[in-house]
Amino acid sequence: MLDKLNRFLQKFMPFMTPLAVLFGITFADQLHHLVFIVPWLFAFMTFSGSLGSSFSDLKKVILHPLPIIICLLLLHLVMPAAAFGAGALFFPDDDYTKTGLILSFVIPTGITSLVWVTLYRGKTFLTLCIILVDTMIAPFAVPFILHLFAGASVEMNAADMMGGLIWMIVLPSIAGMAANQLSKGTAPKKLNPFLSPFSKIGIGVVVAINSSAIAPYLETLSSKLGGIAAAVLMLSITAYLLGFLAGRVMKEETAGIISLTYNSGMRNISAGAVLAIAYFPAPVAVPVIMGMLFQQILAASAGSLLNRMNHQQREMPVTKAV
């Protein structure tokens, strides 16, 4: 039963987050009281997602670090700079929206990218390495980059934010890897059938609760919502394209290009919403919540495009030199 539920939820993922956002806004009065449980839910989701990783995976990063370094630069330098530029161009007088855009594109890559990479036969090992390394540097990179681009305009507590990232992402990831290592790889096989469906449900619950927390501010920003959504969508598409182009420039094989595309395009958007609501004024979370509307739909669209391009390449005739 749990396996059937998990497969259903996996197919339903592109629609889960938009529906959860609408549910959270509709039932904001009932749900916003539950914000305190979100970090706990998120820690559980991170633990579940990290069970497939092990400490030995980190050692292998040293052998082929270039794709990982390029992806991290896209995640934590290129895209935050692009978000800063988009905010300055389209929302010059709105510090909260500018900060929210930067936050949306400085948070680490999403663990759910592994689901999509596996689905479209990407390089899962590369994806795991990017997730692991990004998870470890996130408590330091995220506050630093945020302060670099937005520190002067919006007050934030970098130390508290670092602690939140360690609690929600780093410690559960280490626990998941330790369980895998100590069980010699049997923990994922035993635990994932039980944890995976609840982890996916957890994504919907986290999104709904976080959306409820910003509902009161949506009315005051109603005239800007379309512009914010358009900016987030444009930046999200750009992130996917940059990951794809990076893979092509480095002459990665198809599986590597798929991994770089997803890891550059997808973000741990739920973590971003938790950070926005916990450490910033509520309007900062609006661009992050907007990102939730697009993330899974864009992931499905990217997979379809990659599949089509790969199919066309296989069908191209091979010309022989005379």
Image (cartoon, helix red, strand yellow):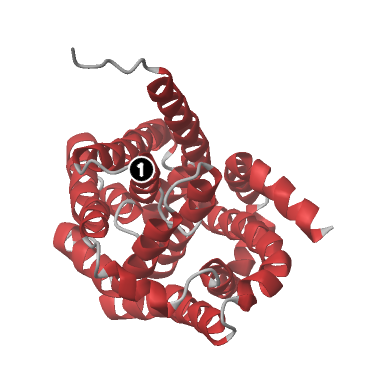
Residue farthest along the front direction in this orientation: 322
Local crowd at mark 1 within 10 Å, few (<14), some, or many (≥20)? Answer: many
Residue farthest along the bottom direction in this orientation: 182
Q: Position of residue 72 (x, y in %)?
A: 25, 58
152, above or below 288, in the image: below
Q: Which residue is mark 1?
A: 261
In the picture, measured across the screen, residue 63 lies left or right of residue 168, that is left
- Residue 153 falls in image quadrant: bottom left
Q: Residue at x 79, y 60 (%)?
A: 2
Q: Residue at x 43, y 43 (%)?
A: 220
Q: Quadrant of the N terminus?
A: bottom right
311, above or below 156, in the image: above
Q: Secondary structure at mark 1?
A: helix
Instruction: Using the rendered image of the protein, determine whether residue 282 is visible from the camera's viewpoint.
Output: no
Q: Nearer the viewer, residue 99 or 198?
A: 198
Instruction: Using the rendered image of the protein, determine whether residue 294 is visible from the camera's viewpoint.
Output: yes
Q: Nearer the viewer, residue 164 or 178?
A: 178
Disc 1 residue type?
Thr
Q: Quadrant of the C terminus?
A: top left
Q: Position of residue 277 (x, y in %)?
A: 44, 63
